[in-house]
Image (cartoon, rainbow, N blue to C red):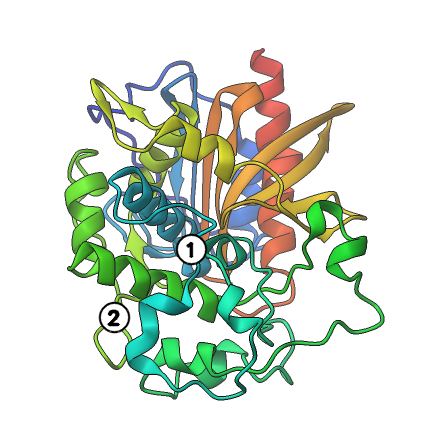
Amino acid sequence: MKTIRMMTFILTSFVAQSGEPLNMKELEQQIADQELKSITSVLIQHNQQLTYERYFNDHHEQSRHDMRSASKSITSLAIGLAIDQGKLAGVKQQVMPFFSHKQPFENSDPRKEQITIEDLLTMSSVLECDDWNSASRGNEERMYIIEDWTKFILDLPIRGIPPWKKKPIDSPWGRTFSYCTGGVQVLTELVERVAKQPMSQYLQKNLFSPLNIKAPLFSQSPLGITNGGGGMQMTSRDWIKIGQLMLSDGRFEELQLIPAEWITQSFKPRAMIDESRQMSYGYLWWINQFESDGQTITAFAAAGNGGNYLFIIPVLNATVVITSTAYNTPYMHQQSRSILTQHVLPALLNRQ
């Protein structure tokens, strides 16, 4: 049986001293027996107290986890900050005028000129970009081998809606979802243009430093633009702080770091991902409906490859971080979500 490493100690700010710890022995045994594979940490903060914190598979409290596309939700916060500071006019602002220096764009079409910040925040622009389809011209793997990621995306043709998908006019909220990392990268470069500095530095000044978060590790595009679509590395406790900030309507101590209205708007359903699973999408945040003990519980999530999650559960006043290195495996998301539904939610509901 593998040894399970546990580290728990007191931090100031959002990570308060632990109260009565949650009993998660069954979960720990499943991880030790490799029934749940490649899990590296599980943290639960309830009522602003860290009630569970465990690290596995040679990880510890100082480990920085590559939560892949969970980074996209941080890019959403950067957009909200830029709007609040008057650097952007709002989500209805058109994107193309910010990149006139990159023109001419291929596959010219007047519909491209109408693409808004909101279209990219909701993964529902008219561009033919789908990371879940290896045949897509805009698939992120094709983007990474091009020098200028933004131009690669804005050069794309207009997408068609296949017969098995609902057209925007027939879809909830009038949008057809298509997962597009490249669109988030366009938002990242947009932030850098209006902030006149790398997005990583902009976030450090306005978000991370006030939260006492050590500068996360960011990768960059070949042109030196912050990679806002994935790969940012922070500790699990750093992610808990982000989750608690969202639960607290963007407020930390005496500071309003993120506008409360931006959080409200970000958590509002904007595009349907999967009706059968009641899964929708806000402004780069996933919106999930989970069943536990006969209750339907809404959880907002930053999610990434490998089964990495930050869950925010307002009805339980809880934030949950699950990190994993099960990258590109068929079970990665299923097992992390099962940790939430089979172990975490029942434990929290029993404390109510």
Which-is-in-front pick, marks 2 and 1?
2
Residue lying at 65% horizontally and 53% vertically, measured from the top left: 334
Among the 4 quarters of the image, the one containing residue 157: bottom right
Q: Give the percent coordinates (x, y) of residue 125.
A: 57, 64
The answer to which of 149 and 125 lies nearer the viewer is: 125
Let me know if residue 317 appears in the view. Answer: yes
Residue behind mark 2? 225
Q: What is the quadrant of the C terminus in the image?
A: top right
Among the 4 quarters of the image, the one containing residue 224: bottom left
Vertical placement of 266 versus 75: above or below? above
Q: Give the percent coordinates (x, y) of residue 52.
A: 42, 28
Residue behind mark 1? 72
Q: Give the percent coordinates (x, y) of residue 123.
A: 56, 59
Q: Residue at the right extreme?
A: 163
Vertical placement of 188 versus 7: above or below? below
The answer to which of 172 and 92 lies nearer the viewer is: 92
Alpha carbons under labels 2 and 1: distance apart: 15 Å
Among the 4 quarters of the image, the one containing residue 195: bottom left
Let me know if residue 44 appears in the view. Answer: no
Residue lying at 34% horizontally and 37% vertically, measured from the top left: 242
